[in-house]
Image (cartoon, rainbow, N blue to C red):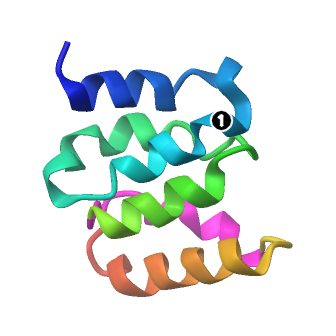
Amino acid sequence: LGLQAAIVEISTNRNAKRGRQSFVMLLGYKCCRPHAPSLASQLDDPSVNGHVISTLLKMQASGFVREVRSFVQHDRTWIRNKAKTYCERFAGAD
């Protein structure tokens, strides 16, 4: 098991709750982009959804505007701002 795959495995283990946030952020590099679909599958989890949006933005994974768009109205300002930035940057890519 490669290091990135191990980090993804921890990041997608919902039993770890908020403890996964730092692991999600470790994947915020272009070289980790192949793992973007696995991360995006965690957008429905309030424990890490903001961190997932931030990481998708950092890794420049463009295929998730539809999923991220629902967070543009989020009650937490930092999540709302990350979602707006993501949607603005990748709106034409989908």
Q: Amino acid at mark 1?
A: Gly
Q: Please give left or right for residue 45 compared with residue 32 in the image.
A: right
Give the image location of residue 68, x and y in percent: 55, 63
Q: In the rendered view, would you say 59 is above or below 86?
A: above
Residue lying farthest to the right in this orientation: 75
Name the residue beneath numbered marker 1: 19
Does residue 32 lie above or below 58 as drawn?
A: above
Magenta portion: prevailing SS class: helix
**Horizontal side, residue 70 vs residue 6: left or right:** right
* Viewer-proximal residue among 43 and 51: 51
Can residue 51 be seen from the camera position used here? yes
Quadrant showing the N terminus: top left
Residue 69: % across, % down: 59, 69
Residue 83 painted magenta: no
| Residue 67 visible in image | no
Q: Quadrant of the C terminus?
A: bottom left
Vertical relation: 38 (above or below) 71: above
Q: Which residues are magenta?
A: 60-73
Q: Position of residue 63 (x, y in %)?
A: 32, 58
